Image (cartoon, rainbow, N blue to C red):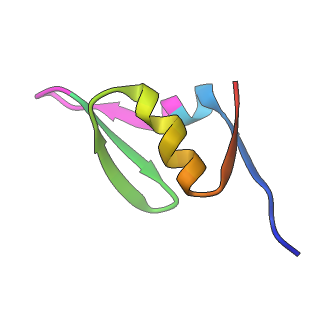
């Protein structure tokens, strides 16, 4: 049986930390990403198998 993972977009944004030199550090499922804009979070979450709820 496959597990369905869901997360609200607001929650995912709360996982991003703003970097002093610009951009954000986003950690999901133990993997760290350096992103330029929080809108990239949806794609990353989808790649991890999450259904993002807006």
Look at the picture and state if 54 lies above or below 51: above
Identity of the residue drawn at 33% across and 49% down: 33
Total number of numbered labels? 0
Identity of the residue drawn at 45% across and 62% down: 30
In the rendered structure, the answer to whether residue 35 lies left or right of residue 40 reads: left
Q: Which stretch did the figure color magenta? A: 13-22
Image position, residue 12 (x, y; %): 55, 36
Residue 21 in magenta?
yes
Q: Quadrant of the C terminus?
A: top right
Identity of the residue drawn at 64% across and 56% down: 49
Residue 4 in magenta?
no
Residue placed most toward the observer, 23 or 49: 49
Image position, residue 6 (x, y; %): 74, 45
In the rendered structure, the answer to whether residue 26 lies left or right of residue 1 reads: left
Identity of the residue drawn at 80% across and 65% down: 3
Look at the picture and state if 37 lies above or below 35: above
Residue occupying the far right of the picture: 1
Residue occupying the far bottom of the picture: 1
Look at the picture and state if 42 lies above or below 20: below
Residue placed most toward the observer, 19 or 42: 42
Residue occupying the far left of the picture: 21
Q: Quadrant of the N terminus?
A: bottom right
Image position, residue 21 (x, y; %): 11, 28
């Amino acid at each position: 049986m496959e597990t369905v993972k869901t997360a609200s977009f607001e929650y995912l944004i709360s996982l991003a930390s703003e970097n002093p030199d610009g951009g954000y550090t986003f950690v999901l499922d133990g993997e760290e990403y350096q992103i330029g804009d929080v809108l990239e979070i949806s794609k990353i979450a989808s790649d991890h198998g999450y259904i993002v709820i807006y």
